[in-house]
Amino acid sequence: MEIVILVVVIAVVLVGAAAGLVVSAGRRKKAAGTEQPAPPTATTTETRTAEPHVGEEAEGTTEGARRTIEEVGLPEAEREPEAEAAPAPAAPAEPEVEIPAPAAGRLVRLRARLSRSQNSLGKGLLTLLSREHLDEETWEEVEDTLLTADVGVGPTQELVERLRERVKVLGTRSPEELRGLLREELLTLVGPDMDRTVHTEAQGADDRPGVVLVVGVNGTGKTTTTGKLARVLVADGKSVVLGAADTFRAAAADQLETWGTRVGARTVRGPEAGDPASVAFDAVKQGTEASADVVLIDTAGRLHTKTGLMDELGKVKRVVEKQGPVDEVLLVLDATTGQNGLVQARVFAEVVDITGIVLTKLDGTAKGGIVVSVQRELGVPVKLVGLGEGADDLAPFEPEAFVDALVEEA
């Protein structure tokens, strides 16, 4: 009896479990048939891409036939836009090298300018000599005229004595005869036979340039004269190196370099307040290495009353001479300084052995007699004269042209 009851209970439990399974399966099937996948949403600004499926669910998701790698192609690498290259800064234009006018006959071409400033001397003398009676008072006036023109005491006395003798012999005196007489005596006084060549060629040596030392006091136009002389030499077909040995005046080296650049001449310079002798030495050395024809050395303006500075100028010359002799030493004098210029000339001559004189500002004064007095004082010829501020107004001194400018008829 008990066994029958146990069998019945087990049967009931099995039937209940089977019924529960059937109900659960039906519910799942219904739920599967009613559930709809959510449609994909899209916006105007973004498209959502389908998430990749995994395993069996991945089947059927490939759209269209598969393409080979050749058909797909590789994406081109993104290239950053090339920045436009900035234009290279334009190189500064090379200054145009000037071609100076030939030096030959330059003083003759400038004679008109010279005569306007110097004619008062010749005109005054001719007026005095044209008087009907030449008494002692007249001859004293002739002397005063010559002294005022800075001819100097000794040359003046010599000239007056010769004029008195020749006028006495001549007797009658026409204006033309007087002009010819005065021209002859002035030309003799100026010294037509003196060697006025500016020596720019090395003496007895073919492997070094000629060396020209330019000296003078402050304010005489020394640096400008050096630059103008470079133009004269370039016009004559010579290659020039400039030595800026004036290291005490800040603008001197710049000024000289500007002159050199205009004619294609190299400028050798040193530090401001540096050793002038060292700069001069380097200039000659570089001139030799470059096979230049001439080296022009511009020294600092010296006051002839400053012993230390004058000694330093002597040092510059000695240091340069270690490479060879200095071929020319030009003393630059201001023609307007008159007899004071002679004092300067004496001191410079004692220190550096002057070989030639350059007279500047000769066009602005009626004191052209300084040509005579400075030559007589030093026994050294005037070789160059400055007749104006123009770049080509430095000219070789020609005694005939100078005297003609003095006595020509206004």
Image: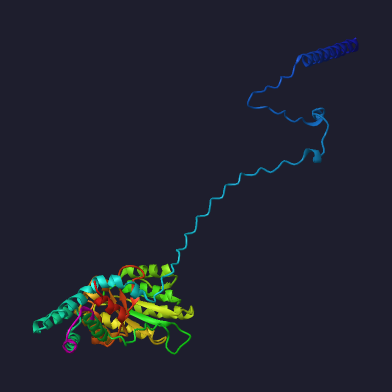
| Secondary structure predominantly adopted by residues drawn in magenta | helix
Q: Position of residue 317 (x, y in %)?
A: 34, 84
Identify the magenta region: 164-176
In depth, the one of 49 and 163 nearer the eye is 163
| Residue 118 sits above or below residue 171 on the image | above
Numbered disc total: 0
Dividing the picture into quadrants, the one containing residue 227 is bottom left
The colour scheme used to paint the residues is rainbow
Q: Where is residue 372 in the image (x, y as percent from the top left)?
A: 24, 83
Dividing the picture into quadrants, the one containing residue 70 is top right
Q: Indicate left or right for 111 with 267 as reference.
A: left
Q: Can residue 98 be seen in this view?
A: yes
Dividing the picture into quadrants, the one containing residue 160 is bottom left
- Measuring 18% from the left and 78% from the top, which residue is drawn there? 125
On the rendered image, what quadrant is the N terminus found in? top right
Does the magenta-highlighted stretch encompass residue 171? yes
| Residue 313 sits above or below residue 14 on the image | below
